[in-house]
Amino acid sequence: MNAHWLDAELEGADTTPERRSKFRKKKLLGRRKLDDLTAEDPDGIADDTIRRLIDTGHISEIVAELKSGKEATAYVAHGPRGPVLVKLYRELEARSFRNDAVYREGQVVLDERAKRAMQGRTKKGLEMLQADWVSAEYAHLWTLWRAGLNVPEPLVGPNVKACAETVPAVLMRLIGTEDEVAPRLSEARLTPAEAHSAWQQSVQGLADLLRLGYAHGDYSTYNLLWWENTVIIIDFPQLTTRQNPNFSELLRRDAQSLATSFRKHGVQTDGEATLREVQRLVRGKVPEPRIVLP
């Protein structure tokens, strides 16, 4: 490998804000219009990422927009193995959710120039953060899927190089069908019995994450799906580990968010009681690991 590969990667990375204007500015990619992601001829698709995903055979076409959030938009697509959810991230500076520092504390970046670039959010630093955000979600999905947790199946990886080829998109199996996509628990209408089951599964899911050394960082009914009487955990880029000095606070916040968001389903409890139950369940039964075939 060329010894100067990192110098090329970091060109302009340490540039001060006053000097960044010399670099060509481009329009930030925020929420893409569906018309830009579809065309009868794939060569006519305006979005470079979607064209690349089609060219590499990951998907054949985008079918519909599913949900737009604070950092990404989810689309339904056709894939070689069935329906695919394409989570297409906006560029970091085009997101309403930009401050990821609380989740990144404790992460080790060995190269000092790369570290300064990311901390300073320079042009190249933002590109690195974008790639890292996507790679982290793939890595977390694979870890949780293999451990047997109820999460969407990742459709790219676990090879890091393969995951990097889809940036800024994350591809996973669609929960539900193209005609009936699984709703978020925040939108689902549940009977009292279903609400009780969903609550127990959700608390168990938080315990399973903790057993693996994770805090979700945004755990509530907004990031839990309800499909065939099963709770599916989603949205993992902000997942953090015990190396993060904010871990305990993020875990406590997850428990509080879960308790608060379940009140609409008739579950009346608080964050502290929820956290105690999570800590009790950590010592219980472990999910059956999945066998991932080559």
Image (spheres, grey):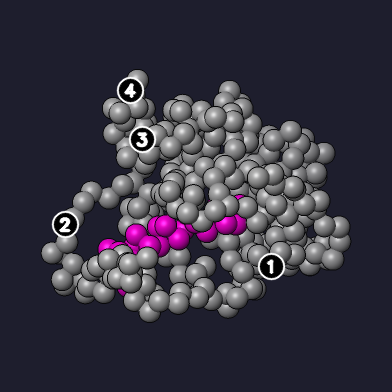
Name the residue tied to disc 2. 24
Give me the disc on residue 213: 1
Q: Is residue 144 visible?
A: yes
Name the foreground residue: 12 vs 183.
12
Q: CA distance from mark 2 to mark 3?
A: 24 Å
The span shown in magenta is 119-141
Viewport quadrant of the C terminus:
top right
Amino acid type, label 2? Arg
Residue 9 in which image quadrant = bottom left
Instruction: Return the residue at label 3.
Output: 51
Type of secondary structure dominating the magenta stretch: helix
- Kindly state the secondary structure of the residue where label 4 is placed: loop
Q: Which circle's residue, 4 or 2, is located before the other in the chain?
A: 2
Mark 1: amino acid: Gly
**Camera-nearest residue between 269 and 237:** 237
Residue identified by numbered label 4: 41
Q: Earlier in the sequence, mark 2 or mark 1?
A: 2
Nearer the viewer's eye, disc 4 or disc 2?
4
Give the residue displayed 37% in from the left and 65% down from the top: 1
The answer to if 199 sits in the magenta stretch is: no
Amino acid type at circle 4 is Asp
* Outermost residue to the front: 1
Q: Residues within 10 Å of mark 3 (few under 14, many from 20)?
A: many
> How far apart are the two marked residues, 2 and 1, measured between alpha carbons?
42 Å
Query: Furthest residue to the left?
Result: 22
